Image: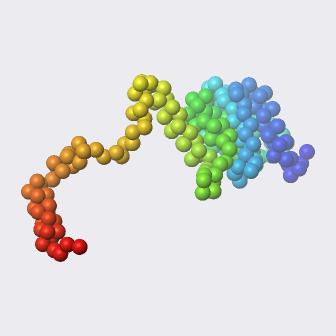
Amino acid sequence: MKPSTLTSEQKRDIIVAAAEDKKANYSTEIDLRGKTLIADFFIICSGTSNIHIRSISDGVIEAMEENGIRAHRTEGYSEATWIVVDYGDVIVHVMSETEREHYKLEKLWTREVVADPTGTVILPISAALRDDAHARDESDEEGSDEEGSDEDDTDEDDFDEDDLDEALDGGDDEDELTALDSDEKDHTDGPRA
């Protein structure tokens, strides 16, 4: 098979088979077509140690070279906690379970692209941040007292009389009185409408 005739789907299949041969854990294929121009597919899998992560990456590289395809670049091989092998239209991520849990690439790239009410497209990262904030709000509500649920309806920007008194106490009282006196004089000395 000539490299020029391999489709991104065929490359994906070769990569997945090679990763499975090296006992990669939790292999995931993410179809990025229509979501980004970066690549057509991300293949994400995990290794149990640095040696296992390198072994999976080596297996993928060897399988692709047997089919006449060389990687554009490989990054992270020396640390072997997250190795990225770039084949242009297919990008392979071989990660430690810790790194994978921390970065959550699957969650980031499997979101639907949505638009806000003005029609502006919300990028997946914005949606991920919004959903994480929503999840934190829900966990705060679960931890709060059910009887005190009315507290959630209050707005942090509410300004009550105590806040007004504190704000006024911070300044010089004589200057405030002088300013008030001059305002009263302006209103009483002038013609009334």
Residue 127, quarter of picture:
top right
Residue 169 visible, this angle = yes
Q: Is residue 146 left or right of residue 178?
A: right
| Position in image of residue 7 (x %, y %) | 85, 47
Question: Residue 49 versus residue 107: which sits nearer the camera?
Answer: 107
Q: Is residue 156 left or right of residue 90?
A: left
- The residue furthest left is 174
| Position in image of residue 58 (x %, y %) | 72, 35
Residue drawn at the location 57% of the way across and 29% of the way down = 98
Residue 56 visible, this angle = no
Residue drawn at the location 17% of the way across and 68% of the way down = 187
Residue 77, quarter of picture:
top right
Quadrant that contains the C terminus: bottom left
Q: Is residue 159 left or right of residue 132?
A: left
Colour convention: rainbow
Residue drawn at the location 61% of the way across and 30% of the way down = 96
Q: Is residue 25 left or right of residue 152?
A: right
Quadrant that contains the N terminus: top right
| Position in image of residue 30 (x %, y %) | 73, 40
- The residue furthest bottom is 191
Residue drawn at the location 43% of the way across and 29% of the way down = 149
Whether residue 59 is situated above or below residue 185 in the rendered picture: above
